[in-house]
Image: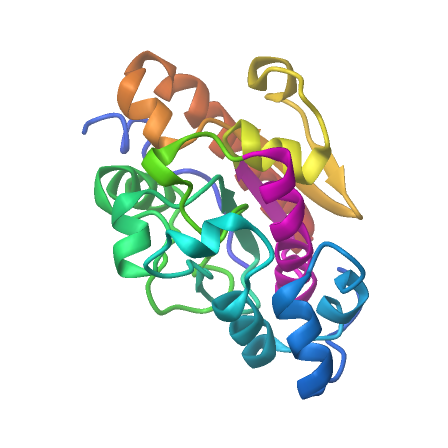
C-alpha cells in the first residue's frame, strides 16, 4: 500500500480476527434479533454480512427500537484497512440510515481526505468502513445508557471481525468506552496506540465535538497522523 503520509495538516480545520463463519439459520437469527446481549452473542459471531445487516435492522433488544426511524448499520468497504467507529446516530443519521451525515459527516470526510481516504468507492486501502457504537438514535440525542451500549456491543464486535481492519479509529468517549472499556477522559487516552484484540486502535475526538470546540482540531490532526503511521506500519 502506498504511504499514508498526511497531505494537508489543516485540510479539515478550514471549515486480524478469525475469518467469517457461516450465517446462522432462521431460528438462531430470531434469537439474535430479540436478545443480542443476553445469550445470543455467540450467535452474532456466526453471522455473515447479509445476516448481520438483517439482525441489526430487526433488533428489538432495547427500548431504542421504539423510537427509531432507521437502524444505522454502517457504510464503506467491507475489508477496509481503516475502520472508523463513532458514538450514536443523530437526527439526520436516524432519518437517512447512514452514519456521519450533516455537518459532522462533512468534517469527517475532510479529515479522511487529508489522509487520502474516502467513504466513496475505492480500494480497501483508500475506502474506509464507518459505523457507530450504537445502531439506533437515543431520543433527543441523549447519551446512550450502559444497557444500550451492551446491547449493540456484539454487533460492533462482529463488524470488526468481518472487516478485519488494520487500524481502528475510535471517535468520541462512548466509542472508546465500548471498545476499550475505559471511562478515562479522551485527553488521557489520546496520543498512544491501544490494542483491540490485536488490532491497533487510535482514540480521537468526535467530529461533532470538534465543530463545538474548533481549537481541538489541531489535536485531532495529531491523532489522524498517528493512525496514518499505524496504517503505514501495518502495510510493511
Q: Residue at x 73, y 79 (%)?
A: 28
Q: Nearer the viewer, residue 56 or 204?
A: 56
Q: Nearer the viewer, residue 35 or 197?
A: 35
- Relative to residue 44, is residue 84 drawn left or right? left
Q: Determine if residue 190 is in view.
A: yes
Q: Is residue 144 magenta?
A: no
Q: Residue at x 48, y 33 (%)?
A: 224
Judge whether 193 appears above or below 186 on screen. Answer: below
- Relative to residue 1, is residue 130 drawn left or right? left
Q: Is residue 153 magenta?
A: yes
Quadrant assignment, res 208: top left
Total numbered circles: 0
- Quadrant holding the N terminus: bottom right
Residue pushed farthest bottom? 25
Q: Residue at x 75, y 60 (%)?
A: 16
Q: Determine if residue 24 is in view.
A: no
Q: Nearer the viewer, residue 88 or 107?
A: 88
Judge whether 77 appears above or below 135 on screen. Answer: below
Q: Nearer the viewer, residue 32 or 154?
A: 32
Residue 205 percent location from the top left of the image: 46, 26
- Relative to residue 221, is residue 214 drawn left or right? left
Residue 18 percent location from the top left of the image: 80, 67
Q: Residue at x 71, y 34 (%)?
A: 180
Judge whether 52 appears above or below 102 on screen. Answer: below
Magenta segment, which residues? 145-170
**What colouring does the structure picture have?**
rainbow
Q: Main secondary structure of the magenta part?
A: helix
Residue 102 percent location from the top left of the image: 22, 44
Amino acid at each position: 500500500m502506498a504511504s499514508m503520509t498526511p497531505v494537508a495538516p489543516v485540510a479539515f480545520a478550514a471549515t486480524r480476527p478469525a475469518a467469517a463463519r457461516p450465517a446462522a439459520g432462521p431460528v438462531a437469527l430470531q434469537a439474535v434479533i430479540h436478545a443480542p446481549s443476553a445469550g445470543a452473542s455467540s450467535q452474532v459471531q456466526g453471522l455473515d454480512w447479509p445476516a448481520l445487516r438483517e439482525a441489526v435492522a430487526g433488533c428489538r433488544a432495547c427500548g431504542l427500537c421504539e423510537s427509531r426511524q432507521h437502524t444505522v448499520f454502517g457504510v464503506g468497504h467491507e475489508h477496509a484497512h481503516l475502520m472508523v467507529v463513532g458514538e450514536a446516530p443523530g437526527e439526520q443519521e436516524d432519518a437517512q440510515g447512514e452514519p456521519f451525515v450533516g455537518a459532522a459527516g462533512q468534517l469527517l470526510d475532510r479529515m479522511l481526505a487529508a489522509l487520502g481516504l474516502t467513504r466513496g468507492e475505492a480500494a480497501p486501502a483508500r475506502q474506509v468502513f464507518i459505523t457507530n457504537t450504537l445502531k439506533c438514535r437515543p431520543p433527543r440525542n441523549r447519551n446512550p445508557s450502559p444497557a444500550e451500549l451492551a446491547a449493540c456491543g456484539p454487533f460492533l464486535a462482529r463488524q470488526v471481525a468481518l472487516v478485519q481492519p488494520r487500524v481502528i479509529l475510535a471517535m468520541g468517549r462512548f466509542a472508546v468506552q465500548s471498545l476499550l472499556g475505559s471511562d478515562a477522559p479522551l485527553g488521557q487516552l489520546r496520543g498512544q496506540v491501544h490494542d483491540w484484540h490485536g488490532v491497533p486502535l487510535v482514540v480521537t475526538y468526535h467530529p461533532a465535538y470538534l465543530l463545538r470546540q474548533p481549537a481541538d482540531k489541531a489535536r485531532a490532526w495529531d491523532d489522524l497522523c498517528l493512525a496514518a503511521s499505524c496504517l503505514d506500519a501495518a502495510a510493511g
